[in-house]
Amino acid sequence: MSEPSMPWPRQLGRLSLIALGVAVLASSFAYVAGWIDPQRLSPQRFIDTFEANAGVYPGYRRAHAKGLCISGYFDSNGAAAGLSQAQVFAPGRVPVSGRLSIGGSNPHAADTSVPVRSMALLFQQADGQQWRTAMNTPPVLAVGTPEEFFQQVQAMQPDPATGKPDPARLQAFFAAHPQSAEFRQWAQGYKPSSSFASSTFNSINAFYLVQADGSRQAVRWSMVPELAPVALAQQPSDADALQHELLARLGTGAVRWHLLLTLAEAGDAVDDATRQWPASRRQIDAGTLVIEQAKGQLEGECHGLNFDPLILPEGIQPSADPILLARSAAYAESYRRRTREGTPVATAGAQP
């Protein structure tokens, strides 16, 4: 028997938390890349406004501010080598460094206060080329253009009287954007896992795998955990519950995800991140991500990394998705700001 549907006000609250986690900085992609009227609002002014609304935490990322660094390797099984000349897909191991995080701009927020989680990775090939990717728990976005992202963030601005988004305004936004239906359907049924190690992370945007002869195959990818997910039953009292759970788990052994590549077919929406591809699409298990260590984000390598999704090796190319093409510039602006501010000092009792 299916679960009873969630009342619409609660659905809106859930949607606002999830959508805000993936859309707040995404809307800045539009400005940083010059997608929306640069004469009216500059990238710097937009992010100034964003910081005024979301809070200023010098030295931290402007989105997904709370996380921890991870390291290990990717063990390729060679199954994707026939689709891409990228060295990462040849049989063998590639060193990996990365970051696990939650959504939002507060580096001291409770780990389970935001449903959205992220995994960012840097694959270091032996030939010196890198593959950087930033993945999130949602498989799709609510909107597909920078302009619509801006409208979404406007709809989610907190009401000064309540400190929360106005349900009527949010409902009007989703009603005016029917392309958000797949995202809303996913969000209604999404149950956050009790561990980073049992969470699935998705590329959301599509890319092309490219062979040496130039032939291309559009794909999306997911990191699917070997550990079976267990839904978070209740809010833990520990504000750093997810981080502490992962560190304890790594104390007993490595954690693993499988890199699943989903292959597009004719007619699939390659350049539109609001639309899922049919479940019948062919998938390739390209290998295993093995994470062996984790450190606080101010101590590990990930603090100095910009996980720009357009840093790609030969053999992987971006699609023409307008959101994807704008992300690189936004990440760069966020990186410039936090590096100018310097490394923040961890506060006592906090896990930054």
Image (cartoon, helix red, strand yellow):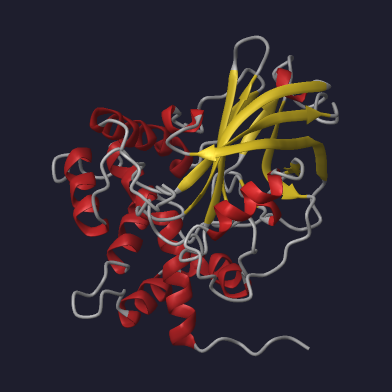
Give coordinates of residue 148: x percent, y percent.
36, 57
113 relative position to 70: left or right = left
- Above or below, 94 relative to 79: above
Residue farthest toward the left in the current orientation of the protein: 40
- The spot of residue 277 in percent (x, y) is 69, 54
User: Where the N terminus falls, by quadrant?
Assistant: bottom right
- Residue 159 or residue 211, whichever sits in front: 159
Quarter occupied by residue 140: bottom right
Horizontal arrangement in the rendering, residue 91 relative to residue 86 (left or right): right
The answer, for residue 294, to whether it is visible in the render is: yes
Instruction: Residue at 73%, 30% (x, y): give it.
Output: 74
Q: Residue furthest front?
A: 348
Residue 306 placement (x, y as % from top left):
44, 30
Q: Is residue 347 above or below residue 175?
A: above
Determine if residue 121 is in view.
no
Q: Return the residue found at the far top.
A: 127
For this rendering, which residue is in front, 193 or 309? Answer: 193
Residue 251 position (above or below residue 133)? below
Which residue is rendered at x = 31% and y = 74% of the image? Answer: 165
Q: Nearer the viewer, residue 17 or 294?
A: 294
The number of discs equals: 0
Vertical relation: 20 (above or below) 291: below
User: Residue at point 70% right, 44% down?
Assistant: 251
Q: Position of residue 13 (x, y in %)?
A: 43, 77
